Image (cartoon, rainbow, N blue to C red):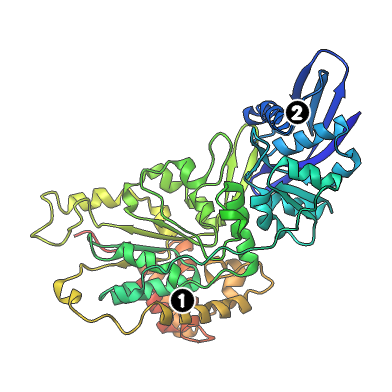
Amino acid sequence: MVAHISTVAFLGLEARAVEVQVQVTPGLPAFIIVGLPDKAVAESRERVRGALAAIGLALPPKRITVNLSPADLPKEGSHYDLPIALGLLGAMGVIDAETLASYVAVGELGLDGRLAPSPGVLLAALNASERELGLLCPAAQGPEAAWAGTIEVVAAPDIVSLLNHFRGGMQLPPPAMEMADPPAAGPDLRQVKGQESAKRALEIAAAGGHNLLMAGPPGAGKSLMAACLPGILPELTPAEALEVSMVASVAGTLQEGRLVRTRPFRSPHHSASMAALVGGGAKARPGEVSLAHLGVLFLDELPEFQRAVLDSLRQPLETGRVSVARANAHVTFPARVQLIAAMNPCRCGHLGDPALACARAPRCAADYQAKVSGPLLDRIDLHVEVAAVTAADLVLPPPAEGSAEVAARVKAARDIQTARYDGHGIRTNAEADGALLDAVATLDEPGRKLLAQAAEAMRLSARGYHRVLRTSRTIADLAGSDEVRRVHVAEALSYRRRAPVN
């Protein structure tokens, strides 16, 4: 007899159907798993054997063959434990084999029979919904699976509960959908003394989803302003929350099966490798740029990152996705992020201050800034110089306007963009391109002349020219203007200049 049950294999954010076929036949006792299993799947034999022994079931002294079909698709992860165990119970006649065929199962087994969480349950639930099947998963991930829709979700704490559920001894309650608790409030813009131009650039970046680079001496407030950004960004829409949660589910970072409700904020250390930042590794996991999807990727001390690592961000910043190619797989992760970067003007950080600058100035500044490639800088819409904070600034009372006031203006600008791009598959001005950008960012005659003159004088690339257009459109949205005027273009151009090396 052959028992069948479905599960999934993960390739990026794609869940591919896998059929688990279990056959028990006479012959020398053996437990064989075929179908390109990796080490974790091959070890399922011992976890399944231990879990069944813990509930008083011994494997029959026969030849047990488990086939994971299709056989040419690599199988990775511990989530194959539960479908293998259930398929074996179906082949042994403990569970009705026909009932198992109507479910997708995912979950890791402990040696005591408990079901442990495994990455990707949300994707497995969506796959089960598309195939009109039910889902069997660990109890801790039931709330995560419930977001897939109206499918039957059986979330069990252990294999005994699952057996009793199928045999009619008990009825496991359907899990309820849950959202993650809101995080603790971050810093408020009222904590930032002075730095009005930098705060204005931060507001524009938040309103249009633009990339921002802040350059200034240590202690000027660059990291503090970056930490304030999540507080002025609009909340995730339900569709965006599902996208972000799918990435977190595959990465195994979804807390207690609850959907994410706030935009991610990722701040990797400058020692991060290329695989850590853009994804990859032996099993092609999502990197920081994908974990920050629809949120913020903050790179502090930008020139301290390896140049090759920084340059690996160029394609994701342009396309909004990361493609990881491996010999056995080619996977794609979403990476629509807002890059916020901070850097010192030179290694000592005090360029322009004769009392504090090192003896190598200004040569040290040229060498330090050259660590960041021109093509990467060209992909950053807003460049702002952050001045040093003086003692006189620190004794001033807090500014009257904080994150709440700025967030209200940002939300109003984002609402305009949501209506503008409805049906175009994009969300913000930073994503507009081609004919669509020309249509939504039509300049008045003075603005067109200014941009043409500035593009020639500043030697803007085609990419730089279009990024100025996008930024101008966002500034006009913040001002509530349907037309992009000369004043909006002038402000956008002011952010394309980089602080000169003196």
Please identify the quarter of the rendering in which residue 3 is found: top right
Q: Callout 2: few (<14), some (14-19), or many (20+) C-alpha neighbours within 10 Å?
A: some
Inspect the image, locate mark 2, and give the three-letter code of the amino acid beneath it.
Gly
Question: Residue placed farthest to the top in the image?
Answer: 28
Q: Residue at x 27, y 80 (%)?
A: 398
Query: To which residue does mark 2 refer?
Result: 35
Inspect the image, locate mark 1, and give the three-letter code of the amino acid beneath it.
Ser
Question: Residue placed farthest to the left in the image?
Answer: 355
Q: What is the secondary structure assignment of the residue under circle 1?
A: helix
Q: What is the secondary structure assignment of the residue under circle 2?
A: loop
Where residue 210 appears, x then y in whole percent? 46, 67
Report the front residue among 66 and 140: 140
**Given this view, does label 1 or label 2 mark the residue nearer the observer?**
2
Report the front residue among 7 and 274: 7
Q: How many marks?
A: 2
Quadrant location of the C terminus in the rendered image? bottom left
Label of residue 472 in the image: 1
Quadrant location of the N terminus in the rendered image? top right
Q: Residue at x 23, y 82 (%)?
A: 397
Where 456 sits versus 78, above or below? below
Where residue 95 appears, x then y in whole percent? 86, 38
Where 357 sits versus 116, above or below? below
First reached walking from the N terminus: tag 1 or tag 2: 2
Whether residue 187 is visible: yes
Q: Residue at x 62, y 45 (%)?
A: 119
Where residue 156 appears, x then y in whole percent? 71, 48
Q: Are marks 1 and 2 in contact (CB under 8 Å)?
A: no
Q: Callout 1: few (<14), some (14-19), or many (20+) C-alpha neighbours within 10 Å?
A: many
Report the front residue among 364 and 386: 386
From the viewer's perspective, is 443 left or right of 66? left
